[in-house]
Amino acid sequence: MRSHLQIAPEVAAALVAGGPVVALESTIISHGMPWPRNLETARRVEAIIRDAGAVPATIAVLDGRIRVGLGDAELERLATEAGLAKLSRRDLPIALATGGSGATTVAATMICAAAAGIAVFVTGGIGGVHRGGESSLDISADLEELARTRVAVVCAGAKAILDLPRTLEYLETRGVPVVGFRTSAFPAFYTRESGLAVDHRAESADEIARIMAAQWRLGGGGLVVANPIPEADALDPALIDRAIAAALAEAERGGIRGKQVTPYLLGRLEALTGGTSLTANIALVINNAATGAAIAVAYGAQVRKDAG
């Protein structure tokens, strides 16, 4: 795997020194937000992580190489290049073998982060079981990756367009802890609560770091750190539920399937909510970045404590 990795000098130096590093996905830039908000958000998220004492490592595949840590020119390429591929686990070997380029999903970013030695990854929301997944079998590869790959994923829950009860059931079956950061409720991306419970409520980054260390000493895979959108930025549940129902109906009529579903729905939600869903999306990602950086710092201290 390391033969495919190109780690930025800043990231490599931090990893060698045992410093805190936070992985960031790239589909949120290429497929999750429109220009220029995507690039503005990517830059702001990286700045927040640096201000918190950690090193950001945005991950993508560019010209057949896994890039761990990107410069501003690469971020702009992700934000503006038309037709950039969306890469999950199954797509990575093809892109690497053919010299392709693409943005990494949650699953692919976890694979690349783990290969580079990064333990904490910040995203907006994880994928999961799609509505109607009991018959379509449309289930995100993110869930299987969480079961096998040792990375803590800081997110605002799963995307609200999904079947959240079945998503949590899948994670429970595969042994993935879902830890709420100062919450007992599983957040629903745009809203702070889904009506579903997390497995454990953690009050501090230090507590989450201890859980990470224990999970991996036991031979477990990844874990979900559920970090609710700030209350001031949360959307009205009734408003977003109506918009999601309308967007799902439009996707069904349009025959939208597979990896195109999520970008389509996010775009339609932005239109149906008059842009408020995009504003909320940006707010929750920024909030996750601050939390993820704090966890990365705490985990680095935990590793040093365990080693000493």
Image (cartoon, rainbow, N blue to C red):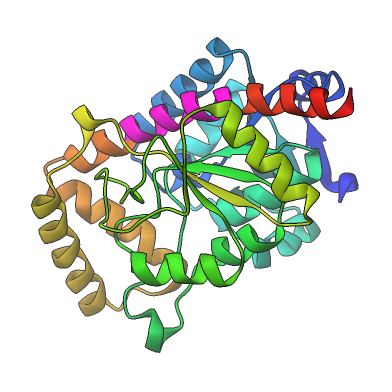
> Which residue is rendered at x = 25% and y = 71% of the image?
251
Residue 273 in view, yes or no: yes
Q: Nearer the viewer, residue 79 or 200?
A: 200
- Magenta span: predominant SS is helix
**What is the quadrant of the C terminus in the image?**
top right
Q: Answer with left or right where residue 162 lies relative to residue 145.
A: left
Relative to residue 258, is residue 86 drawn left or right? Answer: right
The answer to whether residue 70 shows anywhere in this view is: no
- Asked which quadrant contains residue 213, the reply is top right
Tell me if residue 247 comes above or below residue 111 in the rendering: below
Residue 149, given in percent of the width and then of the height, sits at 71, 55
User: Observer-nearest residue: 163 or 76?
Assistant: 163
In the rendered image of this protein, does residue 265 appear above or below residue 206? below
In the rendered image, the residue lying farthest to the bottom is 135
252 or 220, nearer to the observer: 220
Q: Per the image, is 95 magenta? A: no
Figure label count: 0
Q: Which residues are magenta?
A: 282-294
> Is 253 left or right of 5, judged from the image as shown?
left
Residue 222 at x, y percent in the picture: 65, 52
Query: Residue 98 in the image: x percent, y percent?
Result: 76, 59
Q: Quadrant of residue 117?
A: top right
- Taking the spot 35% from the left edge, 68% from the top edge, the residue there is 165
Identify the residue at horizontal 54%, vertical 10% (top origin). 51
Q: Is residue 203 above or below residue 105?
A: above
